[in-house]
Image: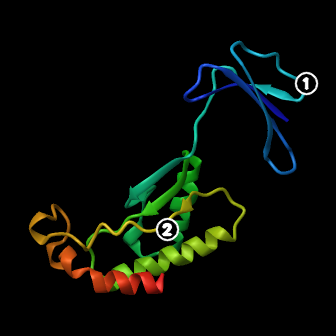
Amino acid sequence: MRLDNVKLFNSSKYHSFEIDEETGVIVNILSSDNPMPTTKNGTNLMDCYITPGFVDTHIHGAFGFDVCDMDTNSIVQMSMKLAAIGISAFCPTTMTISLDKIYTTLECVKDAKKILEDTDEPHAEILGVHLEGPFLNPSKCGVQNVSDSILPSKASEILDDIENKY
């Protein structure tokens, strides 16, 4: 299978990608300053662009799901829906919530990651967790819940525990 006359997002050249139909792996790339003729087994993608997958390092939720819903399926669904819009990897991000809820959320992320590793469905890879909260200065935490915030200087023991568990 070939994809002909595709432009990369950062290039003015035309590219044809030869793809192994069994593995889906690109096995050859041709480049030209001018459009190339479409081959018998090719698809002409003139005026189409290929971009790399994007990485979202700070996402609390999407598509009606929230990382802190404490629901493994929510994180799995987020991952699958993010992949459909071009996100190839992400870091689920916590809010300032109680430590019990943080630990439950981390368990859900861990479980979601395992489910996603065992599926053939397209999904965005979970790279790790962005712990935005609760490690915020209570006097500068904006809309985050002040009662659940923990001074960053007090975070060391908690972070050690999280690192050992996850």
Q: Amino acid at mark 2?
A: Ser
Image coordinates for residue 144, horizontal then vertical, percent: 20, 66
Q: Circle 1 sits in a helix, a strand or a loop, which is it?
A: loop
140, 28: nearer the viewer: 28
Image coordinates for residue 106, horizontal then vertical, percent: 44, 78
Residue at x-position 73% and y-position 14%: 35
Q: Residue furthest top?
A: 34
Disc ID at residue 138: none
Q: For marks 2 and 1, give the CA distance.
A: 43 Å
Residue at x-position 49% and y-position 73%: 109
139, 112: nearer the viewer: 139
> Which quadrant, please, contains the N terminus?
top right
Q: Amino acid at mark 1?
A: Lys
Crowding at label 2, few (<14), some or many (≥20) Cα neighbours within 10 Å? many
Residue 150 visible (yes or no): no
Identify the image quadrant of residue 147.
bottom left
Crowding at label 1, few (<14), some or many (≥20) Cα neighbours within 10 Å? few
The residue to which callout 1 is attached is 40
Image coordinates for residue 70, horizontal then vertical, percent: 42, 76
Identify the image quadrant of residue 123.
bottom right
Residue 62 visible (yes or no): yes
Colour convention of the picture: rainbow
Please state if 120 lies on the left or on the right of 40 as rendered. Answer: left
Disc ID at residue 74: 2
Residue at x-position 71% and y-position 25%: 15
Please state if 51 lies on the left or on the right of 27 as rendered. Answer: left
Q: Is residue 88 above or below residue 117?
A: above
Q: Earlier in the sequence, mark 2 or mark 1?
A: 1
